[in-house]
Amino acid sequence: ARRIVLAARPHGEPQDSDVRFEEFSLPEPREGQVLLQTLDLSLDPYMRGRMSSAKSYAPPVEIDAPMVGATVSRVLASRDPGFAEGDVVLGYGGWQTHSVESTTHLRKLDADSAVPHTTALGVLGMPGFTAYSGLLTIGRPQPGETVVVAAATGPVGSAVGQIAKIKGARAVGIAGGPDKVAYLRDELGFDAAIDHRADDLAEQLAAATGDGIDVYFENVGGKVFDAVLPRMNTYGRIPVCGLVANYNLTSLPEGPDRSGALMGVILRSSLTVRGFIQTEFAAEQQETFLSEASQWVADGSLKYLEHVVDGFDNTLDAFRDMLAGRSFGKTVVHVAD
Ligand code: NDP
């Protein structure tokens, strides 16, 4: 089997020398374990955090240890009567072509499902759940309100905007480049879409949010946040989900300390700013999410787009592309058929 281990902690964008490809031999599965072949590997922004030793909600990947990640895999051998050879499962095999995993955290995927099994890594998986739980629990969009989200063609943002629409709110998406903007407006039915690379981002946002912003689902930070903040309505909600604009930064951006001004806006506009990690909602909401989101996918109100990169060798490139916005849709590495 082959795996990708973390060779060094990246400074800025991860470099080729920060990882190492290795051959390794797998242990025999023990009682309650299965031997898995990775079919598809999910690449997600949080993995950049795991490469770093900075304090976080989860411990970093150790140097020389394989990178972590959610996988769709086929069971090659089973020591659990609940899993048979050939079953396809959602697991956490990491950046490896094969893994041995305990079955307690595996979910069997329905072979007859109308949607591809990669959806378990995206719209019907962790990113979809992040959008659902963060938006509905913290954002609480009401009919007629305006919801703004960036990284809007990614798996989290695209679900945020569409779920906002399902709940009767207006959705305004922010993304990088004209193709993504057109997709948001024409395919996903966002009420407005804006390119964050435009020089007049603030003006375009003002035009698209004439009644202000009630919910800003924060995925990126940076200059998008700067443009959004002055437009927040009284009692607005900001679920803080991610700050991908910062993940490859090596130091804070130049400029005066504006945290005092930020606190002033939060105070005067009675904003609720609440960070979250999706796992906190899993026990209570995972089941309802799966049944509701599956229904929305089936009836066409929740569409999804996958950016499938072929070949395990391309994993690091695909990861860098996803962070930088060179991907379009949920990034998945197709490892084996
Ligand atoms: P995406 O696939 O959408 O990838 C991130 C995207 O962010 C890029 O493709 C790029 O798209 C955009 N982006 C990158 N840099 C900037 C920038 N400087 N300004 C504006 N946009 C930028 O990721 P996901 O949908 O998987 O994740 C979205 C966010 O949700 C991330 O911040 C992630 O960390 C967070 N998250 C949080 C979870 C939680 O539990 N709190 C769980 C899962 C995800 P573009 O071309 O549009 O610029």
Image (cartoon, rainbow, N blue to C red):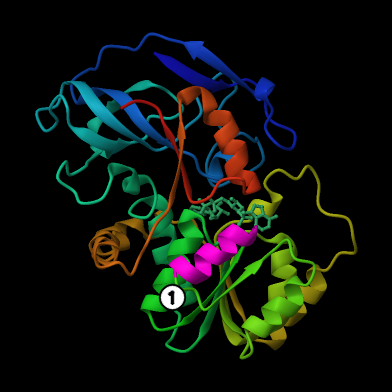
Residue 21 in picture, x, y percent from top left: 54, 16
Q: Which residues are magenta?
A: 176-188
Is 270 positioned to the left or the right of 111 in the image? right
Q: Main secondary structure of the magenta part?
A: helix
- Where the N terminus falls, by quadrant? top left
- Look at 35% across and 21% down and name the residue there: 98
Is 109 positioned to the left or the right of 27 in the image? left
Residue 219 visible in the picture:
no
**127 to 100, vertically: above or below:** below
- Where the C terminus falls, by quadrant? top left
Residue 175 in picture, x, y percent from top left: 61, 61
Residue 239 in picture, x, y percent from top left: 54, 68
Residue 336 in picture, x, y percent from top left: 35, 25
Residue type of the residue flagged with mark 1 = Ala
Q: Extreme left residue here?
A: 81
Q: Which residue is mark 1?
A: 164
- Look at 61% across and 33% down and name the residue there: 51
